[in-house]
Amino acid sequence: MSRSVEPPAVREVAAARAMDDLRFIRTAMEDASGFTSVPGAWLAVVGGVALGTVAYLRWGADIATGSPRWVVSWALAAALSIATGVLLMRRKASGAPGGRASRPGRKLVLGVGAPLVAGLLASLGAWRAGVPDLLPGLWLASYGAGVLAGGAFSPRPVLALGGCCLALGGAAFFAPLAFADAFLGAGFGVLHLACGLVIARRHGG
C-alpha cells in the first residue's frame, strides 16, 4: 500500500497556521487577564481615600450630605484616586512581561470609562433637577457596571467588587440621603480595600 507524502510547502503552511492559532490563544488569555494589571495597591488607596473622605465629612468638617461642598469633596476624592491609579498602573504595567503597558489602560478606559461618563452625565442631570438623593446610587451603580464590563473575564475578586458596588448602588436609590456616606464608604472604601489586598497578594502587587 502506497503512502502519500505531504509536500513540504503544505507542512510549512500548516505549521504557520498552528503558530498563528497559538499566538491568538495566548493574546486572548493575556487580554482576558489584563484587567488584573490594575494594581491592588491602587484599589487599597481608593479605599483609604474613600474612608478618609467619609471621616472628614461626618466628623471633621460636618458637611451636610447632598450640599455643594459634599459633592465637591467626593469629586476631589475621585480625582485623587484616578491620578494615583494612573501612576501606579503605569508602574505595574511597565514591569509586565513584554512591556504590555497599554492593554490594561485600554481595558480600563473602554470597560470602566464609558459607564462612568454615563454616570457623570446622569449625576449632572440629577443635580440640576435638585435630587441629590440619586447621586450615591448613580456613582456606585455606574462604577460597578463599568468594573463588571471591563473585568468580564477577570478573577473573582474583581467581579465581586463590581457586582457588590452595583448592588449597593441599587440599594442606595431606595435609601434616605442620610445614609449616602455609609453606602459610599462601604462601596468605595471597604470593598476596595478588601479587593486591593487580595489582588496585591495574588496577582503581583
Image (cartoon, rainbow, N blue to C red):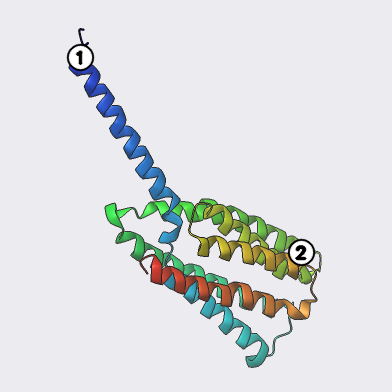
User: Which picture quadrant has residue 169?
Assistant: bottom right
Give the quarter of the figure containing the N terminus.
Answer: top left
Name the residue rendered at 73%, 80% in the picture. 65
**Tag 1 secondary structure:** loop
Q: Which residue lies furthest to the top in this view?
A: 1
* Amino acid found under the numbered disc labelled 1: Pro
> Residue 7's mark?
1
The residue tagged 2 is 126
Residue 141 picture location, percent across and down: 67, 62
Viewed as shown, does residue 155 lie left or right of 22? right
Residue 90 picture location, percent across and down: 37, 62
* Amino acid found under the numbered disc labelled 2: Ala
Residue 53 picture location, percent across and down: 59, 82
Q: Distance between the residues labelled 2 and 1?
A: 70 Å
**Tag 2 secondary structure:** helix
Give the quarter of the figure containing the C terminus.
Answer: bottom left
Q: How crowded is mark 1: few (under 14 residues within 10 Å), some or many (20 or more)?
A: few
Q: Which of marks 2 and 1 is in front?
A: 1
Name the residue rendered at 65%, 66% in the picture. 140
- Residue 96 versus residue 7 in the image, above or below: below
Residue 3 picture location, percent across and down: 21, 11
In front: 30, or 84?
A: 30
- Residue 5 versus residue 33 in the image, above or below: above
Viewed as shown, does residue 4 lie left or right of 103? left
Q: Can residue 76 be seen in this view?
A: no
Name the residue rendered at 65%, 60% in the picture. 142
User: How many numbered marks have been drawn onto this rendered protein structure?
Assistant: 2
User: Which picture quadrant has residue 62?
Assistant: bottom right
Q: How crowded is mark 2: few (under 14 residues within 10 Å), some or many (20 or more)?
A: some
In front: 186, or 159?
A: 159
First in sequence, mark 2 or 1: give its number. 1
- Residue 166 versus residue 47 in the image, above or below: above
